Image (spheres, rainbow, N blue to C red):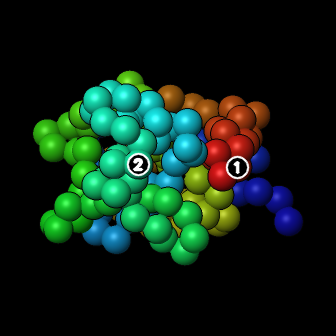
Amino acid sequence: MAKFWKNGLSFTCHQCGNCCTFEGGAVYATEQEFKKIAERLGIELARFYSDYTFMDYGKRSLKSVESGPCIFYKDGCSIYDIRPTQCRTYPFWPELLKSNYRWQQEAKSCQGINKGKFWTSEEIKIELSKNSNSD
């Protein structure tokens, strides 16, 4: 079956924060990414894990605050320059690229989908591979 994005897609981040603030989301990262964040905060990795993460289906995820946003999002991302690969590659996630329907559903909450920069299928494949390597 041909990928609906075989001819490319348009997306430009508007830094609106919608992808960081929806309730029930999980932000997974590698140990190296978690280490960078812990270093930025000036704490040991064990304390970072205890205070800022939880286990979700066998994978470590950043905690959210009670209202839903990522724990590091308040008037913007406080770790933007070292944010996890999952954040860097949005919206080019496997689950969003499974079908045009899923892509268009995501566009309802992301003002940058279907607008701005045109991404070729090769560029999209590169973004997808970054996510699969972060497991």
Looking at marks 2 and 1 on the same chain, the residue that comes earlier in the sequence is marked by 2
- The residue at the point 59 percent across, 53 percent down is 93
Does residue 8 appear in this view? Answer: no
Please identify the quadrant where the N terminus is shown.
bottom right
Q: On screen, 7 above or below 64?
A: above
In which quadrant of the rendered view does residue 108 lie? bottom left
Which kind of residue does numbered mark 2 sit on?
Ala
Q: In the image, is 50 to the left or to the right of 123?
A: left
The residue under label 1 is 132
- What percent of the width, then of the height, locates residue 17? 26, 46
* Crowd around label 2: few <14 · some 14–19 · many ≥20 (10 Å): few
**Along the line of sight, the residue nearer the viewer: 95 or 74:** 74
**Residue at left offset 67%, top offset 39%:** 130
Is residue 95 toward the left or the right of residue 54 in the image?
right
* Snapshot quadrant of residue 76: top left
Residue 115 location, x and y as percent?
43, 39
Closer to us: mark 2 or mark 1? 2
Q: Nearer the viewer, residue 32 or 100?
A: 32
The spot of residue 28 in percent (x, y) is 50, 54
Q: Is residue 76 left or right of residue 60?
A: left
Which of the labelled discs sits on residue 12, or is there none? none
Instruction: Please say if 49 is above or below 100.
Output: above
Corner quadrant of residue 54:
bottom left
Amino acid of disc 1: Ser
Check disc 2 and report the residue beneath it: 46
Residue extending farthest to the right is 1
Q: How many marks?
A: 2
| Foreground of the two, 57 or 93 | 57
Q: Is residue 109 above or below residue 128?
A: below
Q: Residue at x 34, y 57 (%)?
A: 50
Q: Tell me the residue at 57%/31% (across/down).
A: 118
Gap in Å between the C-alphas at discs 2 and 1? 25 Å
